[in-house]
Image: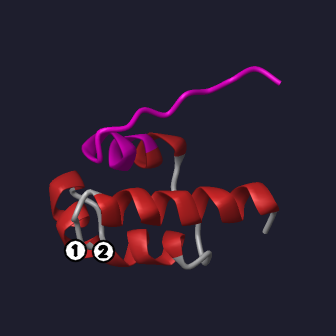
Amino acid sequence: MSKQEDWMRIEFKLIREEAGLSVEALAALTKSGASTIRNFEEGRTSPSVKTFERWLNELGHELEMLPF
């Protein structure tokens, strides 16, 4: 796992917690599995870009893709 991936997971969890949402609540709002979100936050899996964007949007954030 790269440092960028670690940073992304840590930042995501902080954003979710600051929004006051549990993993289960975010899962229900985004029609995702709680285990999918939890596994991402714990570094076991990575969601698709579309799924990650859906989670961020529900938390009031946008995914921005920048050119290399």
| Residue stretch in magenta | 53-68
Residue that protrudes farthest toward the top in the picture: 67
Of 51 and 6, nearer the camera is: 6
Amino acid at dot 2: Ala
Residue 20 position within the rendered picture, expressed as x and y whole percent measured from the top left? 22, 64
Give me the residue at 75% from left, 55% from top: 4
Give me the residue at 33% from left, 66% from top: 17
N-terminal of the two: label 2 or label 1? 1
Give me the residue at 40% from left, 69% from top: 37
Q: Quadrant of the C terminus?
A: top right
Q: CA distance from mark 2 to mark 1?
A: 5 Å
Q: Residues within 10 Å of mark 1 (few under 14, many from 20)?
A: some
Of 45 and 24, nearer the camera is: 24
56 part of magenta stretch: yes
Determine the secondary structure under disc 1: helix
Tell me if 21 is positioned left or right of 43 in this view: left
Give me the residue at 57% from left, 63% from top: 9
Residue behind mark 2 = 34
Q: Is residue 66 above or below residue 16?
A: above
Residue 19 position within the rendered picture, expressed as x and y whole percent measured from the top left? 26, 57
Type of secondary structure dominating the magenta stretch: loop
Of 37 and 3, nearer the camera is: 3
Cβ–Cβ under 8 Å for marks 2 and 1: yes
